Amino acid sequence: MNTKTERINLAFAHKVPDRTPLFEIFQPFQPIHWDICGKTVATDQALCWDAMSEGIRWEELVEASARAQFTICKFFGLDMVRLTGAPASPNYERPVKTGAESWTLNGIDYVLNHRTKLVEYADPAEVMSYSNRVTEEDLIKKIEGWNGSAAEVNVNSFAVYDKVRELAELEGIDWVYMGEIGAGTGVAFYPPFMLMWMLTEPELYSRWLKMSKVSAFKQTEAILARGLKVIALGGDVSCDKGPFISPQLYREFILPVIREHVGLVHKHGGLAVYTSDGNHWNIKDDFFFNSSIDGYKEVDKAAGMTMEKLIEADIDKRICIIGNIDARHILCHGTEDEVRNEVIQCLKLGQQSPGGHILHASHSVHEDVIPENYYTVINTYRDFFDMEPLQY
């Protein structure tokens, strides 16, 4: 029987492990934590915000977050994990409680969403508008004032990882750890004026991209030095209908940074995974092959990135596919039978390749995923490989 690390290494090397490796990202405060970890400041966001407003110490938040993430990843038997963090600094900004289920933070109003159980903007349309998030004038000033240096790495950002790794080593669990860092290449998050810069102000845009890259690469080196072996990079570049920018612009601006980022990861002995939702068929060769990536995550089945098509295009023979359970429809609205069929089909398709497949939702266990459906995912996986079912 392979160890967890061996299982992941074999999948990335396109060799057959004893069973398909298992990976997942659990969004913080997803109710699935409650059955496994109970309701704590790390699993219930309303409790967390109340505790922060009352003065809970950063160290307590880190400890609670690490223990919750360790517990849920162990419970589901993952082989590879990607962790989230507590607030980035001991001197984090504290929310102010304004009502039974409302808070303010930095002058912005927040409320509890009863459907998702998450604390959200009271007026998301206003707060998330590009005009309020970043202005063209302010960004130009930042670019013009940049002195060429990288931002300092915040060592506090590793606090949860360090604690989880300590807990895992005490129990002899050899997880492979994934870190995630973008280098300005997630064009889906650009404000509209930046998309225009690629056409009208290419020198200004290139300087911004370089500024983003320098800091991201320094952070990447720090992540790899900490012992995280797999780096998720890139960021969203496409929507359901295709790339947000033309194939020519992708090739001119984005691909060189991706290749350089991948090269940096490889130089330090790591594995590079392109992470992007959306339909990438119009940039297939650059995205999958010319980028030199080792793996592909957030395989967006609902956008047309199906296992069948990936296999047909021979992508699976060169790229480790990390997916592809539909987290947009099946995990959110599907019946138990539909979830079971989805998992079995995904596992069988993955086994058509000589390794190179890691089972994972098409995005994550996010706020709209029905917890019972994810339990079905795991028990279907375990049954497929003749393992004992989970007890929960």
Image (cartoon, rainbow, N blue to C red):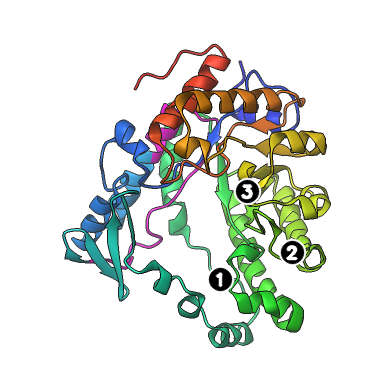
Q: Residue at x 55, y 30 (%)?
A: 79
> What is the magenta range?
69-96
Any mark on residue 188, and which? none
> Marks 2/1: CA distance?
21 Å
* N-term-proximal mark, 2 vs 1: 1
| Visible residue check, residue 46 | yes
Identify the amino acid type marked 1: Ala
User: Is the Cβ of the residue at disc 2 closer than 8 Å to that at disc 1?
Assistant: no
The numbered mark, 3 or 1, whose residue comes first in the sequence reads 1
Q: Secondary structure at mark 3?
A: strand
The quadrant in which residue 191 appears is bottom right
Asked which secondary structure carries label 1, the reply is: loop
Q: Quadrant of residue 219?
A: bottom right
- Check disc 3 and report the residue beneath it: 231
Is the residue 90 above or below the residue 285 in the image? Answer: below
| Amino acid found under the numbered disc labelled 3 | Ile
